[in-house]
Amino acid sequence: MSWFESFILGLVQGLTEFLPISSSAHLRLTAAFAGWHDPGAAFTAITQIGTEAAVLIYFREDIARIISAWFRSLTNKEMRGDHDAQMGWLVIVGSIPIGVLGITFKDQIEGPFRDLRLIAVTLIVMGIVLGIADRLAARDETAARHRAVKERKSLRDLGVKDGLIFGFCQALALIPGVSRSGATISGGLLMGYTREAAARYSFLLAIPAVLASGVFELKDAGEGHVSWGPTIFATLVAFVVGYAVIAWFMKFITTKSFMPFVIYRVLLGIALFVLVGTDTLSPHAGESAG
């Protein structure tokens, strides 16, 4: 992998990690469209450490408060009812599904799941799911002639059951094209949470999963056509760009609909089907040389 490739892929990772459009799919598609080798699951997982570092800095006050309260709750029974302490436990609980399924389906994640036809399907299907969830949220937030505004849930309403559901939604993102933020935000909206609450928990929930995945894949870094230097460079680029995207996205979701992302996902999925169906693009483009 050249330094130019690593820069572009790091840029793509930073731009797409927090948007509900799937960073893993875009890394895969960028390489396929450019005629480059598939960067692979290890490269994807490691560059995600850069974007998660951006999460750690952006939400540093929340994270510090949650960690402090969680540790104190281990020895202080009175702290166990504290919301921040409970959030610590809920992040752990919500991380279980992706940890178990990630290890169980590791070979599929690094192989068959990277087929461009499957990515096209997941882009379209999860785009439609996000669109439905977004419409339901908008309906609750808007008063009508025979309907009052319906109050949606905040993170203070989050319990173990909902935390696990969020976790299983996040685990769907093991398949490129699903999108970690897209799946968890959709799940949250369908469960009745506000956009801000669903997005915030989605970002917090991703921290242990992404960091663990990145560390786990470190052993495979530098193998094949992807060397350590370009991988680290792409991770740094992803960090800088990812931080800017988080700041923008958290402001965007407070007033805007997710429909632009829904339309983009569906159109991209259809375009991908057309390209593969007309043999313009192989469903395994770049894999043989990866």
Image (spheres, rainbow, N blue to C red):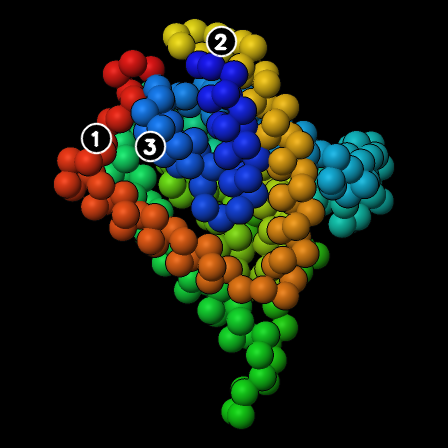
Residue 217, placed above or below residue 57:
above
> Which residue, given by chain and number where applicable, does mark 3 sit on?
33
In this rendered view, identify the residue nearer to me: 101 or 202. Answer: 202
Q: Which of the 4 image quadrants contains residue 55?
A: top right
Front position in the image: 113 or 166: 113
Q: Quadrant of residue 288?
A: top left
Q: Residue at x 62, y 37 (%)?
A: 242
Distance, label 2 to label 3, CA atoms, is 21 Å
Q: Position of residue 189 (x, y in %)?
A: 52, 60
Tell me whether circle 1 and circle 2 mark residues in contact (CB < 8 Å): no
Which quadrant, please, contains the N terminus?
A: top left
Horizontal side of residue 213 vs 272, given as left or right? right
Residue identifier under label 1: 282
Q: Nearer the viewer, mark 2 or mark 3?
A: 3
**Which amino acid does the dot numbered 3 rest on?**
Phe
For marks 2 and 3, the one nearer the N-term is 3
Q: Which amino acid does label 1 sit on?
A: Ser
Image position of 133 (left or right of 78): left
Residue displayed at 53% across by 68% down: 137
Tell me residue 214's x, y (percent).
55, 21
As drawn, 128 above or below 13: below
Name the amino acid type tagged 2: Ser
Q: Which of marks 3 and 1 is in front?
A: 3
CA gap, disc 3 and disc 1: 10 Å
Q: Position of residue 53 (x, y in %)?
A: 67, 29
Question: Where residue 152 sits in the image (x, y, percent)?
Answer: 61, 68
Query: Which residue is tagged 2?
Result: 227
Please tell me how crowded label 1 is: few (under 14), some (14-19), or many (20+) other residues with Cα within 10 Å.
some
Which element is circle 2 on? loop
